[in-house]
Image (cartoon, coloured by chain):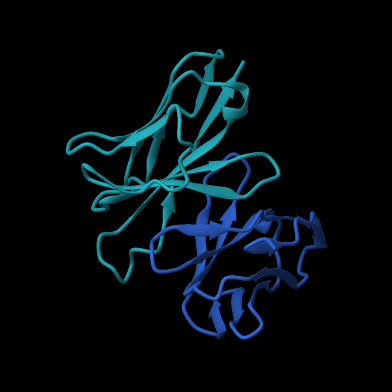
């Protein structure tokens, strides 16, 4: 079983739609959870960061963590064409080494 | 406030040559990480360094790859005798020294290595 599973997409939605991106993990040692956004030919950019189960909101973005079921989600409200990118989930444990999902490619159509 | 700087952006090498990738962390950051991204794959951890110390190199291939972060100057990822399978995007990241923020990695724009 892979440590991290992420739906690769691609996902195509119309502008204004609510987007749901999901990842599951198997390692119970993971302590903190992140979402990164990566535009084409650019480095990943940290979007959301959380330690605990529950929801964390930042503008149009909401990260949801369920440690008992071992999944995390990212919701994007009122999606914009500028949100078109690859979204990477990531986990960390006792060290600073992050484990990344393979990424979901999102296209928001104007 | 400059971010993580990587150079070159693109590097072309022939099989058997050496590749040197450079990374300057964000100002005030003392931890540097190297990741590799292959097509259709996620980012894979390679090595974690602090100034003059390799903290974790568990993701580094055993041969041909080395990394350093000297007291002065950028971090260097060195690949000797490159092969076609080394073609990938190599990303450097840095993080702040304080433990509360240490897990937040800030990435550079990467170096795309192409081996002919």
The image shows residue A68 at horizontal and vertical percentages of 62, 86
- Taking the image as drawn, is residue A110 in sight? no
- Taking the image as drawn, is residue A108 in sight? yes
Q: Residue at x 57, y 84 (%)?
A: A55
Q: Quadrant of residue B78?
A: top left
**In-image side of B59 versus B67 (left or right):** right
Q: Residue at x 55, y 13 (%)?
A: B14
Query: In the rendered image of this protein, which colour is used for chain A?
Result: blue
The image shows residue B26 at horizontal and vertical percentages of 31, 48
The image shows residue A1 at horizontal and vertical percentages of 70, 63
Q: Residue at x 60, y 77 (%)?
A: A62
Query: In the rendered image of this protein, which colour is used for chain B?
Result: cyan
The number of numbered badges drawn on the structure is: 0
The image shows residue B115 at horizontal and vertical percentages of 59, 20
Q: Quadrant of residue B20?
A: top left
**Image vertical order of residue B15 relative to residue A43, above or below:** above
């Amino acid at each position: 079983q892979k440590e991290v599973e992420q739906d690769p997409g691609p996902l195509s939605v119309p502008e204004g739609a609510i987007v749901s991106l999901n990842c599951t993990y198997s390692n119970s040692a993971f302590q903190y959870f992140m979402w990164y956004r990566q535009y084409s030919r650019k480095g990943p950019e940290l979007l959301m960061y959380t330690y605990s189960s529950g929801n964390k909101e930042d503008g149009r973005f909401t990260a949801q963590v369920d440690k008992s079921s071992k999944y995390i989600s990212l919701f994007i409200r009122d999606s914009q064409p500028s949100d078109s990118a690859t979204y990477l989930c990531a986990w960390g444990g006792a060290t600073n080494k992050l484990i990344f999902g393979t990424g979901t490619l999102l296209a928001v159509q104007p | 406030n400059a971010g993580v700087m990587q150079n070159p952006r693109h590097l072309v090498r022939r099989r058997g040559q050496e590749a040197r990738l450079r990374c300057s962390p964000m100002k005030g950051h003392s931890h540097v990480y190297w990741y590799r991204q292959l097509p259709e794959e996620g980012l894979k951890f390679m090595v974690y360094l602090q100034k003059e110390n390799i903290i974790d190199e568990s993701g580094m291939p055993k041969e041909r790859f080395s990394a350093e972060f000297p007291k002065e100057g950028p971090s260097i990822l060195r690949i000797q005798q490159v092969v076609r399978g080394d073609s990938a995007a190599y990303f450097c990241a840095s993080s702040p020294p304080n433990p509360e923020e240490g897990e937040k990695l800030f990435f550079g724009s990467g170096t795309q290595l192409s081996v002919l």
